[in-house]
Structure formats: structure tokens, C-alpha cells
Amino acid sequence: MNFYSRLIVILFAAIIIIPLNSEAIGMRKKGGKGAFAGGSVSAGIGLAFVTADQSGINDLITSAKSSSAATTGNLSSGYELTTHLTFRFSNNLVAIQLRPSYFTQETAGTGSLGNFNYKLTGFTVFPMVRLIPLANEIIDFYVQGGIGYGKLDGDIVNGGRTAKFSGSGFGMQAGLGADFCFVPDHCFGVEGNYRYLPLSRNIVSSSTGLIDGASQSQPDRELENANGSDVATTMSGISGALNYTIIF
């Protein structure tokens, strides 16, 4: 069982087991006594699955399958590990949040020339505004949105050739979710978000040769596909997340 699978099991187990403490259910969450007068501060972590469609990289993979009999599958969903720091105002209806995240997506295989691996890793930083229209002592239902920045690094092993590249840009994110605070000040939640964060230009930082499906992969220039167009990457997509939050 890998790290992500273990984290999912732990979060689900906590959501199921904690409500069994019936005495805790009747106790209130903190409110109005946080680090800032009239509000409360919370922090947490989460794990998300993101449907980032890497059509540009998948075109390179298709070319490698054709020319080098590579067994590499297309890049599909990615994983994202998030952290969040939230200040909730005393009216309990509005909160502001800073949400950094780590993103990863990878596929690997072999071919006539050796290993064929395609890996993307990156990060995002999104300031968010959260509205909480429905709340009681146990449950918060919220909608949220924000504008932020993302950077994505790519690493391709194409038989005996390699290429490293990166792209960055600004985007937006919006979604909704619910937190369940069965124990005072400890909340577990689920949320869904849509993020728009395309990265149309990727600059090559190092290369040991022209990779399959590319017309250009020289350092300090844009990575281009066979027809001369830029190879784009993306951190756009729909995500589903499990979160844990502690209220200070």
C-alpha cells in the first residue's frame, strides 16, 4: 500500500470512528476566541485526485509507442497534497484561506530503446475566499473561490534520451464542500473543486537529444511537438478531496 492509499484509509477511518464518541457530538466548535479577536484560525491538510488532461504530453507518448514500441500508458488523473490556513471572521459566514498544494502525475513503461517515463511535479498557491451559508455545531457547508499561481516541472526519459522542462502561470479555482466536526476543533471534510490553470508554454532546461514526437527539445527553448506547435501542460481539472482541519 503506497502513501496515498494509506492516507485515504486513515481519513476514512477517522470519519467513521470519531462519531462513535457520542459525548463529543453535543459539544460546540470554537468560535470567536481564536488568535484574532472576533474570529478563529484553523489549519489542515488534504488529499485530492485531479482530472488533469495532459493531451500535449500524451501526443508525445503516442509517438513513442509508434516509433519505439513503448508500453507507456497515457497520463490520466494526478494526485495533489494540499495544506490550508484559514481565518474565519466572527460573523461565521465568511473566511479567507491560503492554500498551497503539491501536484504529481506520472506514467512509465519500456520500449525498444529502454525505459520510457513521463513525470510531472509542481505546486500551486491559491488565496481563497470561503462563504459558509449553512452551519451548526457539527457541520459547515461552504462554497469557495480564488485566483492563484502554479508551476509545473516535467521530466521525460525517452529511451536513451531525456528532457526536463517547466511552465508556470496564473489561474482560478472554485468549488464547494462540507466539514464535519464531530469532536470540538477537529474536523474532517469532503470537497469538490474546478481549477483552470493551463500552462501553454514549457521551456526546456536540459536535454540529451530529440525525444519522440517532438520537433524541438533544445535547452532554453520551448518544447514543441512534431508540427511545430508548443507542447502544453495543465493543472486544470475537477478534483475531489478529503481534508482534516484543526481549529485553534
Image (cartoon, helix red, strand yellow):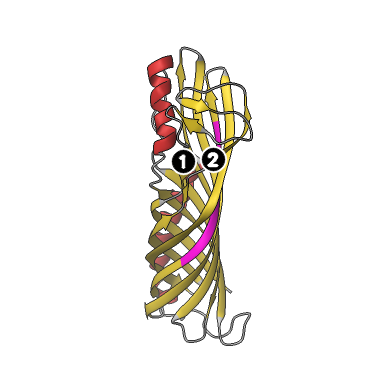
Residue 207: x and y, percent?
A: 61, 27
Q: Main secondary structure of the magenta part?
A: strand
Give the image location of residue 131, x and y in percent. 42, 76
Among all residues in the image, which is located at the extreme front? 228
Residue occupying image coordinates x 46% and y 79%: 94
Task: Report which residue position mark 1 lands on.
Answer: 232
Q: Check disc 1 and give the amino acid type.
A: Ala
From the image, tell me which residue sits under label 2: 202
Distance of label 1 from label 2 (alpha carbons): 7 Å
Q: Is residue 54 magenta?
A: no
Dot 1: element? loop
Q: Residue at x 43, y 28 (%)?
A: 60
Q: Secondary structure at mark 2?
A: loop
**Corner quadrant of residue 15:** bottom left
x and y percentages locating residue 206 in the rendered image:
64, 30
Disc assigned to residue 224: none
- Magenta region: 146-155
Residue 192 in sight in this render: yes
Please determine whether, in this image, residue 26 is positioned above or below residue 182. Answer: below
Task: Give the vertical position of 178 relative to 133 (above or below).
Answer: above
Tell me: residue 240, above or below residue 36: above
Taking the spot 46% from the left edge, 83% from the top edge, the residue there is 92
- The answer to whether residue 101 is seen in the rendering is no
Name the residue rendered at 52%, 61% in the picture: 148
Tell me if mark 2 has few (under 14), some (14-19) or many (20+) residues whose alpha carbon lies within 10 angstroms of its own: many
Q: Amino acid at mark 2?
A: Asn
Label 2 near label 1: C-beta < 8 Å? yes
Give the image location of residue 203, x and y in percent: 58, 38
